[in-house]
Image (cartoon, rainbow, N blue to C red):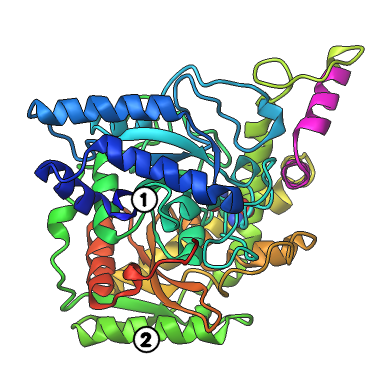
Amino acid sequence: MPNSLTIHRLIERLNSGDVTSRQATEACLNRIQSIDRELNAFIGFDSEEALTQADVADKTRANGGEGALLGVPIAIKDAIAVKDHPLNCASKILGDFVSPYDATVIRKLRNAGAIVFGRVNMDEFAMGSSTENSSHGPSRNPWNIKHIPGGSSGGSAVAVAADECVASLGSDTGGSIRQPAALCGCVGLKPTYGRVSRYGLVAFASSLDQIGPLTKDVRDSATMLQVIAGVDDRDSTSVSEAVPDYSSNLTGDVKGLRIGLPREYQVDGLDSEVKDSVNSAVECLAERGAEIIEISLPHTEYAIATYYIIATAEASANLARFEGVRYGARVNGSDPQEMNSKTRGIGFGEEVKRRIILGTYVLSSGYYDAYYLRAQKVRTLIREDYLKAFEEVDLIASPTTPTPAFKIGEKVDDPLQMYLSDIFTISCNLAGLCGISIPCGFSKHGLPIGLQLQGRPFGEPDLLRCAHTYEQATDWRNKKPKLD
Ligand code: GLN
């Protein structure tokens, strides 16, 4: 079925006239209809509009038009603005807000010919690691629906892994693309901070957020990045560094590539199956000529605390704009202040409130120096650890997550346990690096395991080349969850 194809295979078949974009889009819609009641990946889509876009793509192709994603159905995380579609961040506070404009990434997808269809589920305002903090209820892991799919871009990962779309966009502030990709068995790429415009992404922690693709293989990840990367005058933090040709770099050759293994990543709580799978993946790369070097990232133990101070501080400021006046929902009160506090009290979920309170606290006078300023200093030390390591190595390998997907409900009442599951993904954002998660095995219970590779700023070409080499040496990507 065309919905289960990668972007590059689908493009081949569209070009040969084997299949039309309408058929591919219908196949995705049918798939959603048959399995999404169980998986809860999609929170909204407009079938008619999707099919209209597909017809336009088919016509363009018939007239000799081209595009890297011409006719390919892509699902979008509910944190990215799509013109004339609801934008809710899986939160009640946005009410019936409809986006008046397209995010830059959406504009770029459209220019490349993509079918922008369907909004997918997430943790409210991207705060979470399991998609359980969604006002739409949790999404479910397609490999075992009793388990979480990861988060916060859980819907994006489920939709790709379960073939409800061909590829999707997510956002990653502390692991939200890589972690669900790992837990659902697909490929998730967090680009270097500044590589992709954040214009039109609802801000969680602006110094950490990046948009990136979730795909069925590494070549697709390169294609998607090619389309969405680049400087944007609407996002002053986007960087004008030239965008290389990512796909032409997928040579299958890692000879001489130096891969670091951080000593500090042997943490308590690292599952033995995850550890074994990642070790085998590293061996596989060594057999293909990569050089494996032990490195040290001495400030790793402070990463989670640092992240949860900086991210919550930024979130408390960013979320101040949802006050019942400018966007979405309003609960009336006898004066503006009561209206404001009632709206926020009812509109935000528990986890979001917890973070706003934490963030406000670490920024408050008297505590600012002790928490926020200190965290910023430690952030610099974490970045320096990496930059030093990157003098010796080209990439850093590790597990993406300490365990395979946990059960729905297992950690909801224990936020600290939930935060600890982000140990391997968070530093990448704090240091502004690029990172990718690719499938590297399964637990004995049949749940996917992810290998994470991290690269230096703008090191996506090496990152993708290494990920692709490993992927092609194994056949994890051909395994599909049984859902029918
Ligand atoms: N799990 C992390 C958090 O809850 C990361 C989320 C993200 O990357 N958006 O903040």
The answer to whether residue 313 is left or right of residue 112 is right
Q: Residues within 10 Å of mark 1 (few under 14, many from 20)?
A: many
For label 1, the residue is 191
Q: Which residues are magenta?
A: 338-359
Distance between the alpha carbons at the discs numbered 1 and 2: 25 Å
- Pick the front one: 296 or 108: 108
- In the rendered image, residue 271, in percent from the top left (x then y), is placed at 57, 82
Question: Where residue 280 sits in the image (x, y, percent)?
Answer: 37, 86
Vertical side of 386 occupied by 242: above or below: above
Foreground of the two, 215 or 232: 215
Q: Magenta region, mostly helix, strand or loop?
A: helix
Q: Secondary structure at mark 1?
A: loop
Label 2 C-beta lies within 8 Å of the nearest ligand 1 atom: no
Quarter-of-image position of residue 62: top left
x and y percentages locating residue 264 in the rendered image: 52, 79
Residue at 52% across, 51% down: 35
Asked if residue 357 is among those painted magenta in the image, a careful observer would answer yes
Residue for badge 2: 280
- The kind of residue tagged 2 is Ser
Q: How many marks?
A: 2
Residue 409 position by quadrant:
bottom right
